[in-house]
Amino acid sequence: MAQQNRYSPAAASFAQALIELAGDQAQGVGEEISALADAVSSEQTLRQFFADPSIGLGERWAVIENSLKGKVSELTLNFLGVLNLKGRMPLLGEIVIAYQHLLDEKLNRVRVEVTVASKLDDVDAGLVEQRVSAALGKTAIIQQKIDENIIGGLVLKIEDKIIDGSVKAQLDAMRRQLLASRTAVVGKA
C-alpha cells in the first residue's frame, strides 16, 4: 500500500527513538512492528484490548510479554513495554507509518503508487521500478493500483506529487485544446 504520511508528532517521536535504537536491525524491527500493527488493526478484540483504559498497565503488559516473548526481538518487546507504560498503545499504527517513512529515508527509498489499466507483468513492473529509481536517484518501491478508467499508460504518485501519463489524461488534454481552439475560432467569427 502506498502509505499516507499522516501521523501525530507523538508517533513521530516514538518512531524516531525506535529507529535510532534499532541501528543495523532497523529493517527487522520495522517488519516486526508492522506485523504487530497489522494484527491489531485486523482484530477488533486486540484493538479494544490495547485501547481499553480499564485494563491495567500490568495486566496488559503480562499479556503482551507472554504472547510475544521469544517471537520478536528484545528491542521490539521493550518498545511495546514503553508504549504500554506511557499509555500509547493506540498509536502503534501511526508509529509504524512514521517508522516506515524514517526507514525509507535512511535506506534512500521512495514508495511509488503506479496506477495502470491492467496489472503489469513482472518484467514491465521491473522496468517501471528501474526507470523511476534512476529518475529519482532513490530505490523505488512500486505498488500497483488498477484503474481501468485510465485506458492505458500509467499514473505515478510519489509522495504528494502525481505524474499523469495515462491515455485518459492525454485524451482529456486534446479535448480541452480542441474546445479552446473551437472557442477561439467561433469568437473571431
Image (cartoon, grey):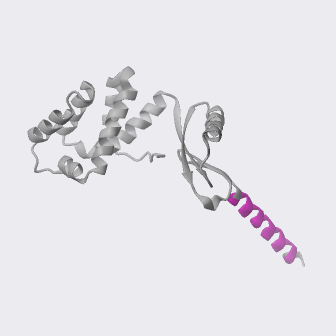
Residue extending furthest top? Answer: 24
Image coordinates for residue 67, horizontal then vertical, percent = 18, 36
Note whether 147 is above or below 92 in the view shown: below
Residue 55 coordinates in the image, percent (x, y)? 11, 47
Please state the total of marks drawn on the protein image. 0
Q: Position of residue 49 (x, y in %)?
A: 18, 48
Q: Position of residue 66 (x, y in %)?
A: 15, 34
Left or right of 182? Residue 145 is: left
> Position of 23 compared to 188: left or right?
left
Residue 177 sits inside the magenta stretch? yes
SS assignment for the magenta stretch, majority: helix
Note whether residue 90 is visible.
yes
Q: Residue at x 46, y 28 (%)?
A: 106
Is residue 9 in sight in this rendering?
Answer: no
Asked which quadrant contains residue 180, the reply is bottom right
Relative to 151, 187 lies left or right: right
- Tell me the quarter of the picture where residue 25 sits: top left
7 up-or-down from 183: above or below: above
Q: Quadrant of the C terminus?
A: bottom right
The answer to whether 161 is drawn above or below residue 180 in the figure is above
Residue at the extreme bottom of the image, as rendered: 189
The residue sitting at 31% across, 50% down in the picture is 42
The residue furthest right is 189
Residue depicted at 52% across the width and 29% down the height: 108
Q: Which residues are magenta?
A: 168-186
* 77 within the magenta span: no
Q: Residue at x 77, y 62 (%)?
A: 174
